[in-house]
Every structure is written in C-alpha cells, then in structure tokens.
C-alpha cells in the first residue's frame, strides 16, 4: 500500500487553508460554511486519532512532559480540563469504531464523540458497543446535549443503580451562593435535576412568552422572574409552606415502570432515576395519559391528587412534624410518604402515609433507607 507522508499531507492542507484565507469574501454561502465545518470536524478527528497513538506510545516523554494531558497543556495550550478530556476521549475512541468513523467523516463533532466516550464509563463498554450505531445516529441529527440525554436513558436502562449513584452525587454537589459586589447581587450555584426543573418551571410560568414590544433580553426577563418569585413568596407570607405538594413538575413515566426500577423523564431536565420518580409520585397529582404506538395520546384523564386535602389534614394533625426518627422539621416542610408505595398497591390511607421532610424523604427513596412501623405505631428507620 502506498504510504502517505503525513508531513506532505499536512503541507497540502496548509496550502489549501492559505488559499481559502486569501479568497476575497463578498458573499458566503451556507452550504460552503457547512462544508468548512465538516472539514474542521474531520481534522479534529484526525488530531484525536493521532494523539491517541502518540499518547499510547508515550510520545510525550520525548518533550519531557509527564503525561499526555501535560503535553497538550504545554504545546496546544489547552486548559487542564480540556486536556484531560481530550486524553480520555482519544483513548476511548480506539474501541468505538462507529463513533470514530462518523467523527472522521465529519458527520459528528468532537463534543458528540466526547459524550459517547463518557457513556463507556457510565453505561459500560458492552452496552455502548451494542447501541453505538443508534447513539451515533442521534449525534448525526442532534446537538450533543440531546445525545447526552440519550446516553442517560441508556444508563438508566442498563445500570439503574449506577444512574441512581450518579444522581445522588449530583444532588450532593448542589449549592447556591449569593454575594453583594459593587452595589449588585451576584448569584451562582448548581442544582440537581429536580431542583433545577422546579426552579425553571416556576420561572417559565412567571416569564410567559415574550410580549411584543418587550425589549428585555432573555437574561433580564429571567432575572425579573426570579425577583418576582421571591416577592410572591414574601407576599403570601408563607415561603416554604406549600404543604408538600408539587403540582407543577411534570414527569413522564410508564404506568408499569412506576413500580419497577425504570427511570422517568422530568420535563425540562431529562431522565431521573426510578427512585426519584417514586418519591415525587409519593405525594403528587397524577394525570393518566395513554399513549399509542405512534406516540399520540389516545386517552387522557383528569388530574387527581394522590392525597386529598382532608387526608392531608388528618395526617398533619397526627404527625405534626417529620416522622423520621429524631427529626422535628415542621409539617409545612414535609411530603406525605407512603410506607408501601401506591404503585406497589399500598393504600392512600392515613395509616399508610406519614410526613417526611424533604431531606428524609429523599433518604428513604434515593438513599435506600427502610422505614417500618413498630407495633406501638412508632417508625423505625434502618440504613441500607
Ligand atoms: Zn415517599
Ligand atoms: Zn426529617
């Protein structure tokens, strides 16, 4: 086989780019731009492919670098995160033939390749190889965020325990900072899926669609909505006392999946583990939608609350506060937790539903704690 000298080939690419740069641009065609983007992706793929070999054979030691990532930082001036990300992706692509081919053909870009490479860790190599063609097809048609969504659906299907662990790790990373600087407030933070979806749903509800003549930027409208949310809570004088009900979160879940380990989909946020779905469904409003094979809704029903207002009052009267042993958070900050979940046939009756504050409710569902009722009516909580 005729071996192409990389130096010569690179020189000809250089000459080609020089020629493009020398062209006078009076008009730029969308089709030309798309071709340019595709070639850019192909070159990125080739860089990644070469780097994988370079790194595998410790080529970086010749330049005195201690690792492939350090070499990328020193010679390609990448940030530490981008460099280690490139090393990770380059290594994984060696065993992802469909992904490497589509990247090399410029059909997907580096971000897509990176998402599929990450999925090897979250879903396991067998599952990714088995579904690689489907994932690559998603990448060909969709933005990387949609592809990530697809890999999360896959993870929830093949490794629900791992998906739950990842979701719990994300929950642990939540945080919110508010600081005052130069007369303005700066907000910064991370929310998990459920928290982010709740906030986003509330903000969207306040913002509504942009009205004609509204000259505010989307960021300004969002900021105004956040302030409005704070005012509404203060005006009602009952911040945090929503009575444990979350009427505005929408989760899509198959009825038969609610009792099993299958994940659901939270509007605005994507897949959430089955344990989270069951916690949210413990005390919520349920609407039944029957969806046909073509994805069209064939039957919809009225929304009904799992706990009626009278039941909720009776339970609040009995419990007064969170019933997790040792906790005294007030009833207003609690959800009604079914000891035997209604999806598993547990009755929505006063003696099967107890008040649990949000952190303890989470501990019972996502944290795997088991709560049982003692003969005297006290609750006993056992760690997983
Ligand atoms: Zn519950
Ligand atoms: Zn509690």
Image (cartoon, grey):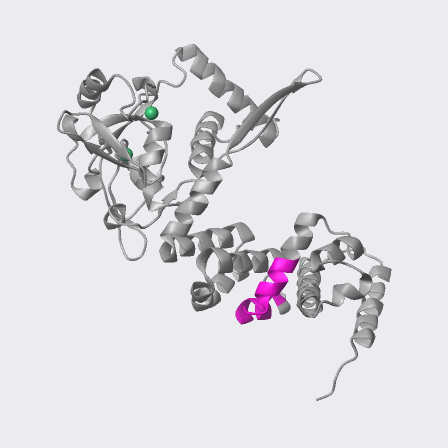
Q: Is residue 90 among what the camera can see?
A: yes
Say which quadrant the N terminus sits in: bottom right
Q: Residue at x 42, y 46 (%)?
A: 165
Query: Splitting the image into four quadrants, where does ligand 1 fall?
Result: top left
Residue 159 at what x, y percent from top left? 38, 55
User: Left or right: where does residue 110 sit relative to residue 373?
Assistant: right
In this view of the protein, which residue sits in the foreground, 120 or 295? 120
Which quadrant would residue 75 be assigned to in this image?
A: bottom right
Residue 337 at what x, y percent from top left? 25, 31
User: Left or right: where does residue 230 sit relative to residue 292?
Assistant: right
Q: Is residue 107 among what the camera can see?
A: no
Asked if 233 appears above or below 354 in the picture, the reply is above
Which residue is outermost to the bottom?
1
Residue 265 at what x, y percent from top left? 38, 45
User: Left or right: where does residue 167 sit relative to residue 31?
Assistant: left
**Magenta span contains residue 99:** yes
Say which quadrant the C terminus sits in: top left
Region of the chain picked out in magenta, as a range: 87-103
Which quadrant would residue 104 be assigned to in this image?
A: bottom right
Q: Residue at x 58, y 31 (%)?
A: 218
**Magenta span contains residue 271:** no
Which residue is outermost to the left?
375
């Amino acid at each position: 086989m005729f071996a192409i000298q990389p130096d010569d080939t690179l020189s000809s690419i250089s000459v080609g780019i020089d020629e493009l740069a020398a062209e006078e641009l009076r008009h730029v065609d969308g089709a030309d731009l798309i071709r340019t983007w595709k070639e850019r992706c192909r070159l990125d793929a080739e860089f990644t492919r070469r780097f994988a070999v370079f790194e595998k054979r410790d080529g970086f030691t010749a330049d005195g670098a201690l690792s492939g990532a350090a070499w990328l930082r020193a010679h390609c001036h990448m940030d530490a995160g981008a460099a280690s990300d490139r090393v990770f992706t380059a290594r994984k692509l060696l065993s992802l033939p469909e992904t490497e081919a589509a990247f090399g053909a410029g059909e997907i870009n580096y971000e897509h390749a990176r998402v599929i490479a990450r999925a090897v860790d979250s879903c396991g190599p067998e599952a990714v190889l088995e579904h690689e063609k489907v994932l690559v097809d998603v990448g060909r048609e969709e933005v990387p965020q949609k592809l990530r969504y697809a890999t999360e659906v896959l993870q929830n299907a093949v490794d629900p325990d791992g998906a739950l662990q990842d979701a719990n790790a994300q929950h642990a990373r939540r945080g919110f900072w508010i600081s005052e600087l130069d007369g303005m407030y700066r907000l910064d933070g991370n929310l998990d899926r459920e928290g982010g979806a709740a906030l986003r749903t509330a903000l969207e509800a306040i913002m509504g669609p942009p009205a004609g003549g509204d000259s505010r930027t989307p960021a300004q409208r969002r900021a105004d909505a956040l302030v409005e949310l704070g005012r509404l809570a203060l005006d009602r004088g009952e911040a945090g006392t929503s009575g444990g009900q979350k009427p505005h979160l929408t989760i899509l879940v198959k009825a038969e999946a609610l009792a099993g380990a299958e994940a659901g989909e939270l509007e605005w946020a994507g897949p959430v583990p089955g344990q989270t779905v069951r916690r949210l469904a413990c005390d919520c409003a349920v609407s039944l939608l029957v969806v046909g094979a073509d994805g069209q809704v064939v039957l919809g029903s009225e929304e009904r609350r799992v706990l009626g207002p009278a039941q909720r009052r009776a339970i609040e009267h009995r419990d007064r506060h969170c019933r997790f042993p040792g906790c005294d958070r007030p009833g207003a900050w609690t959800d009604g937790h079914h000891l035997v979940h209604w999806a598993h046939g547990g009755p929505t009756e006063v003696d099967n539903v107890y008040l649990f504050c949000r952190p303890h409710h989470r501990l019972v569902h996502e944290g795997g704690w088991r709560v049982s009722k003692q003969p005297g009516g006290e609750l006993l909580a056992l760690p997983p």
